[in-house]
Image (cartoon, helix red, strand yellow):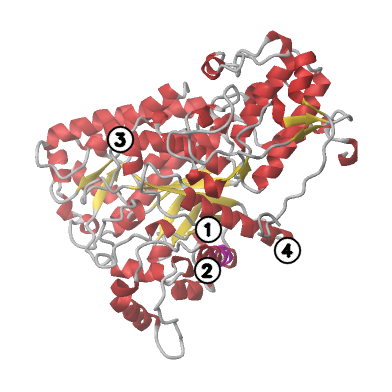
Amino acid sequence: MIHGYELPVVATSLISGRSLEGLIRTRNLTFDELGILAFDVTKAISCMWERRIVHRDLKPSNIVMTPSGRACVIDLGLARHVDLSTLTAVGTTWGTPGYFSPEQARAVKQLTCKSDLYTLGIILVEGGLGRHPSMRDQHHLFTLHLHENLPIELADWQHAALLKRLLDPQPTKRPMPSKMLNWLAQYAPAEQL
Amino acid sequence: MTFLANVGYRFKLPASVDVDGSIVLGSTMAKPTLDRRHKRLTTGYPHLEHRLFDPQLYMAGLDATESPTHCAKLASYPWFGVSGLDEYDSGIQTQASWQDDVEKKIVSICPRHPPTDSGHIRDALQQCIEFQHRFGCRAVILPSPLTTNSGTNYSAELFWLDSALEYLHHRKTENAFNLPVFATVALTDVCVRYDDPNANLLLDLILDAISAREVYGVYIVLEQSSEGDGERQCGNTRALASILRLVHGFSQDCGLRVVVNFMGAFGLVCEAAGAESWASGWYKSLYRFRLADRLGGGLAYPSYWSYPATIDVNLESDFDKIVANGSLDLIADRTSASEGLLAAAAGQDRVRSVPAWQYSANRVTAAKEHFMLSAVQAENLHSQYRDAARRDFVEEWLKEATRRANAVAAVLGPGARTQTLHVQAWLNAFLSYRRDHNC
């Protein structure tokens, strides 16, 4: 009861751990850690998209790294069901600068899971470098053409080609979450293997 | 790569025409008629062995005053949500009398828009999917409303698509239902005529939103509202290049199968951009889609399709003029159906000396057969090439066709009834597509 009204309650799991942002401040991630991060966040994006929900504000501070080393997406405050997309005013967008997909930055209507996947690509680059590739300057980020010029630190990662595809400016050229999960299956939690 | 025949009320194709499959169009036959014919499909119609059914929801805006017969036929399918129709009962009426009754009242009961209520939409989709399944289609074409506003957020179209996919998901879980599923993208040309195809946000939205929904393929239809009454071909470079961009994006970037309908032989160009199939028929209602066309009831006149020049030559006077000028080679397109006409022309005889090709109302059997044979020949020819070689081949074909069409225009002079300008537009669209996609 709040102010005399009965209101529905959403109960969520208590997730212990630290934010990915805090972890990246101390060190960059190993290739294995990047693989786990990619798998777990893709899984979250896939689950949301099955319900036609786009998170729209993925960033390291919205990802919790659990003590067992798994990643967990939190804060769906800006998440939006596609049916509600018309509530976004024309020409405006939501999210955090430095993590916008190109289509999100252009305020394209009807964002899809591909937008969240682009942001995941940025987060993976940030994790691998230990810093945001453009220091969160959104305009500068697009001028880096990361889909063609991946930072040298990530060039030897076995999934570097996949990462480039995530960062493609055209959403249609990014892979679907289901395909990504197949390619990253080696990083699935033990109970899913 | 395949050519599919759009079949109308008459299912039969000439025995000489060997197509890869057919698309049955909802607007050409009322549901009770199709239900009855379904029982006899296995004999006499080999082209229907591989069949698709286009529910044509995008035609919901058709004007019942202008096209009562087609509207009445469409209204007989439950997904149009037309209320006030008496159900056909074979015990008390014939199909013809039922159709007459429907046509009499169609103007007053046709809403001219698809259902908008979510419950009705879900019902409509269920019936549409199950109908195609029962009809023995090789794949399901999911219905979509026509997109008429380039500033749309596409939410209505996506609601139809998501509702269909949700139903199919349950259907697949319940029992084996594994027909491939095509999403329909139906656009009016106003949405694509005025913008650079590469800067058109609507195309970005459609490509992203549809491909992220993991359908098997996409069925593309362009409503040619801006083309003239008397024309058959789409002649707007931007509209054509936009279709090529959609085809390329869906097929090459996303790996989806693409079928293009109602674009005539431009379907061959679409195949070079990655489409798996194109579909067409000869009658105007089977050849192009334009809501303002007056469908049914009119008289059809023959024309002579020329694949080498990519034009429909008017037979009343233009064909004879070209022949008299010694320019038959510009347009000659040899099929078994056109042999008599070409032989007569070679002897400087006029069209009227060949009974099958005389320019008179509804004498169209030879023209129809010739077009279908020519389309099959062209499909076989183009299918010999793949990828870059195919694109080179199409470019050469269109360059040569442009030269021929320009020469024909010069021979005919002003007042010609043969449309030739679209050929340059087809070439320009294809060149621009190759440049933009660096392919």
Which residue position holds label 2? Answer: B41
Position of B13 compared to A44: left or right?
Answer: left
Specify the amino acid type for callout 2.
Answer: Leu
Closer to the camera: disc 2 or disc 1?
A: 1
Closer to the camera: disc 3 or disc 1?
A: 3
Specify the amino acid type for callout 1.
Answer: Arg
CB within 8 Å, label 4 to label 3: no
Q: Chain of mark 3?
A: B
Specify the amino acid type for callout 4.
Answer: Glu
3D distance between C-alphas at marks 4 and 2? 28 Å
Q: Which residues are magenta?
A: B125-132
Query: Residue B190: percent from the left, percent from the top?
Result: 31, 43
Specify the amino acid type for callout 3.
Answer: Tyr
Which residue position holds label 3? Answer: B194
Which residue position holds label 4? Answer: B174
- Determine if the magenta segment contains residue B191: no
